[in-house]
Image (spheres, rainbow, N blue to C red):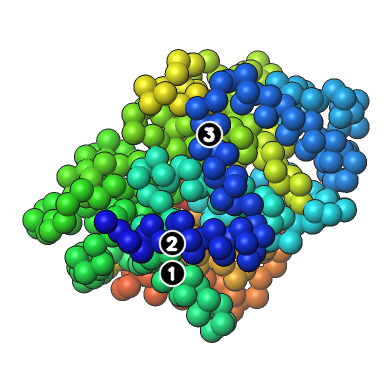
Amino acid sequence: MDIYGSLFRHVMLPVWETHLRKRPVLERWRELRRTQWASLDELHAIQTRAVSRLVEHAYRNVPMYRAMFEARGLTPSDVRTPGDLAKLPLVRRAELRAAGMARASTVPPLPTIRKQTSGTTGEPLLFGFEPDSEHWRRAVKFRGYEWAGYRPGDRALHFWGAPLPTPPPWRARVKTALDRQLHRERYVHCAVMREQDLERVIEVIRTTRPSVLVCYAQAGAELARYVNARGKRAWGRMPVICGAERVTPRDRADLEAAFGPVFDVYGCREVMMIGGECEAHAGYHLSMENLVVEVVVTEHGGERPAREGEAGEVVFTDLHNFGMPFIRYANGDVATAGSSRRCACGRTLPRIEAVTGRVSETLHDANGAAVSGVALGNIFYEVSAAVRQFQIVQHRDRSVTIRVVLAEQLPGEALTQIGSNARRLLAGVDVNVDVVQDLPRNATGKHHLVVVER
């Protein structure tokens, strides 16, 4: 029996979240546990009330959306249900970047929490939200991770991310370390995966005995293939929660052989978890109490919802971000509309199927060690406001070209620093930074963040 995990969930976490910080995260988690089994009528009613509140607020208090409504001759009374959202245009990342603070609320709640996208599409976006939106995000994550058997207080290894070019202040580092210690979360960066790095991760698993592995999909798969090829597995069943990249069939098989069942989650930094796999592994259940998610097909100059099994753009409306709303935001991903039949698990939450627009290829350093393409986005952290788009190309000779489209002029030393940051991760590789006017796009309208020439 895990005494600490039980004590953390039933005593420490409620005392901290509910009684001391007065935050509704656990209350929302309990409600989300209930509504995942609720009727579709109840779930649609929840969305309808939320859409009405969001639209009223955005129309009256967010200049960008007020202008959007007026351009189409609409008022809040015209957009009251999730279906009515189709009366509004899609909003894309470039438009949000151009709008600047016109997309922020002029009255409370204000976007006091500021973030930026990880850059997996090569086009970083700065955005914000208020604390209540953060509470919803955490509650949705708790529910989605619980489908994989992971609850707060369980031992978890996060094989995730890369170190920031400039470490945060020591107070922030101490606070983060203490928080992770209490939650029993161990973080190991996955940007570079040399043999000694993979051995270190294996040693962490052996010594800490985590209940779950949370990882970038391709980084986790690289670790799994190393474990399997060398017969390194010395642990029992360990569920794997994958994010940030699409899990290929080969990745899933390798991860299951090395660790245990794979639970893929789909999300983006703008709203965090959009959907996740349950034990039936038949698509991603959507977090519809927090988001309205559409899969949209554009044809003949118009838009329509994708049919079951048909691919289209992912479009979402964040129901609880009033500080800097996302209404009908197309984040650049492509997904397949799921079945309308109830999942075998019994949950009524609708599903989408394969997400095909988030595969970042893995690069290699001069010694052949794998380097995560997603994690490389952190090399732009300090200049994200000035970088409109980027693309990382590894050529056949392993040299790397970083193509950058600038939103504003950068001094030469900043471009030099980008190259230096990349060389620290890509040991021994020749890295060049080129400023370009535009980047090529594929048939779906996206450009690849990472291109590895074969």
| Amino acid type indicated by mark 2 | Phe
Asked whether the beta carbons under mark 2 and mark 1 sit within 8 Å of each other, the answer is yes
Decide: is 79 above or below 257. Answer: above
Whether residue 318 can be seen here: yes
Q: Nearer the viewer, mark 2 or mark 1?
A: 2
Whether residue 406 can be seen here: no
Rate crowding at label 3 as few (under 14), some (14 to 19) or many (20 or more) other CA atoms within 10 Å. few
Decide: is 212 above or below 309. Answer: below
Q: Residue at x 47, y 22 (%)?
A: 338
Q: Nearer the viewer, mark 3 or mark 1?
A: 3
Name the element at disc 2.
helix
Q: Earlier in the sequence, mark 3 or mark 1?
A: 3
Rate crowding at label 1 as few (under 14), some (14 to 19) or many (20 or more) other CA atoms within 10 Å. some
Res. 34 mark: 3
Q: Earlier in the sequence, mark 3 or mark 2?
A: 2
Name the element at disc 3.
helix
Gap between marks 2 and 1, in whole Å? Answer: 8 Å
Q: Position of residue 186 (x, y in %)?
A: 36, 66
Q: Which residue has dot 2 on it? A: 8
Callout count: 3
Q: Residue at x 8, y 56 (%)?
A: 231
Q: Which residue has dot 1 on it? A: 182
State the residue in front, 454 or 252.
Answer: 252
Which of the image's four quarters has the N terminus? bottom left
| Amino acid type indicated by mark 1 | Leu
Residue 54, by quadrant, is top right
Gap between marks 3 and 2, in whole Å? Answer: 22 Å
Name of the residue lying farthest toward the left: 231
Decide: is 359 above or below 183. Answer: above
